[in-house]
């Protein structure tokens, strides 16, 4: 079904409209051979709060962004190459239900759907697109360089590295970009270059720093920068954590559509200002 949509006018219009919704701040999405498989709103577990994000599943990429005006305007676009995307189920716990982890070398995080049915739809469609893409390219996946899913701020009252420092207004929380734990400034005072996550050296905990140093030395490699001590004023905010959108968990009672909207079956086309159908 996806192959049949590659050259369809409806698919071209859908992708062009999504690109338009992100505006000049987003990357071009119209790529030869690309198909918009489906879309929907999922709740992304950010470091401080749960926030609704609009997700677009293409046959080669997963794109998401902040919702400014639903189905009309988005910002803070993120693109994950499906070739490197892996999924991991999250067991239901309390109010956090219908969730799974989206894992990749550049960024990993947890998302939650409104219903278990929607969760199954999303996971099935993503896995099918990943599988088809890997077969098409004749490649396999590796987990060696996957980025971590950050531990939410609320899950840690003390440093998860030294187990001693208690967080406060003056003693801030920071995240290790290698393992994802919440730690104090002293325990994350080193930086290391993780090129799949950023072109600049990132904050890492002392344990990860030592492990990376040992691996680096064992391989006979030379660091291209000098590790520096990071002042506690250095923030850790993820680029898509900043939002004016409601922070309440997404549910069927919200104004957003609580379902995965698939385009694999041709339906009514949309025009600018209408729905993404």
Image (spheres, rainbow, N blue to C red):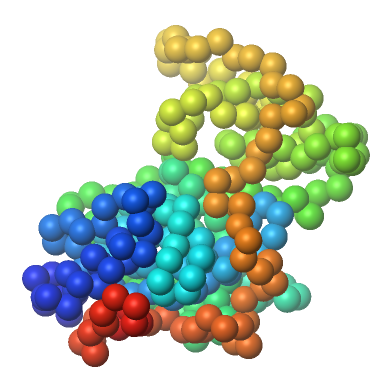
Q: Nearer the viewer, residue 98 or 13?
A: 13
Q: Position of residue 68 (x, y in %)?
A: 51, 65
Q: Is residue 191 left or right of residue 141?
A: right
Q: Nearer the viewer, residue 130 or 58?
A: 58
Q: Position of residue 51 (x, y in %)?
A: 62, 65
Give me the residue at 64% from left, 14% from top: 228
Vertical placement of residue 69 versus 20, above or below? below
Give me the residue at 68% from left, 35% from top: 235
Vertical placement of residue 88 versus 200, above or below? below
Q: Is residue 55 visible?
A: no
Give me the residue at 56% from left, 18% from top: 214
Q: Quadrant of the N terminus?
A: bottom left
Q: Quadrant of the C terminus?
A: bottom left
Q: Is residue 147 left or right of residue 159?
A: left
Residue 20, picture quadrant: bottom left
Instruction: Identify the residue at the far left of this view.
Output: 7
Q: Position of residue 84 (x, y in %)?
A: 36, 50
């Amino acid at each position: 079904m996806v192959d049949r949509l590659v050259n369809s006018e409806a698919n071209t219009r859908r992708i062009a409209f999504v690109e338009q919704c992100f505006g000049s701040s987003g990357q071009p999405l119209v790529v030869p051979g690309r198909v918009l498989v489906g879309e929907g709103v999922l709740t992304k577990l950010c470091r401080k709060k749960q926030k609704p994000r609009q997700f677009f599943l293409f046959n080669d990429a997963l794109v998401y962004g902040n919702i400014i005006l639903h189905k009309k305007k988005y910002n803070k676009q993120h693109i994950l190459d499906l070739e490197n995307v892996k999924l991991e189920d999250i067991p239901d716990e309390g109010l956090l239900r219908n969730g799974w982890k989206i894992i990749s070398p550049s960024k990993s995080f947890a998302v939650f759907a409104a219903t278990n049915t929607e969760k199954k739809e999303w996971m099935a469609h993503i896995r099918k697109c990943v599988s088809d893409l890997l077969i098409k390219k004749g490649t396999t996946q590796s987990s060696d360089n996957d980025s971590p899913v950050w531990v939410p701020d609320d899950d840690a009252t003390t440093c998860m590295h030294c187990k001693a420092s208690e967080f406060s207004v003056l003693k801030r929380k920071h995240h290790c970009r290698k393992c994802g734990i919440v730690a104090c400034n002293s325990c994350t005072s080193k930086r290391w270059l993780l090129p799949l996550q950023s072109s600049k050296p990132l904050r890492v905990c002392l344990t990860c720093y030592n492990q990376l140093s040992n691996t680096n030395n064992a391989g006979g490699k030379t660091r291209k920068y000098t590790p520096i001590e990071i002042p506690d004023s250095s923030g850790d905010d993820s680029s898509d954590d900043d939002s004016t959108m409601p922070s309440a968990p997404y549910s069927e009672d919200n104004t957003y559509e609580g379902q995965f909207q698939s385009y694999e079956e041709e339906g009514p086309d949309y025009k600018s200002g209408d729905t993404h159908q």
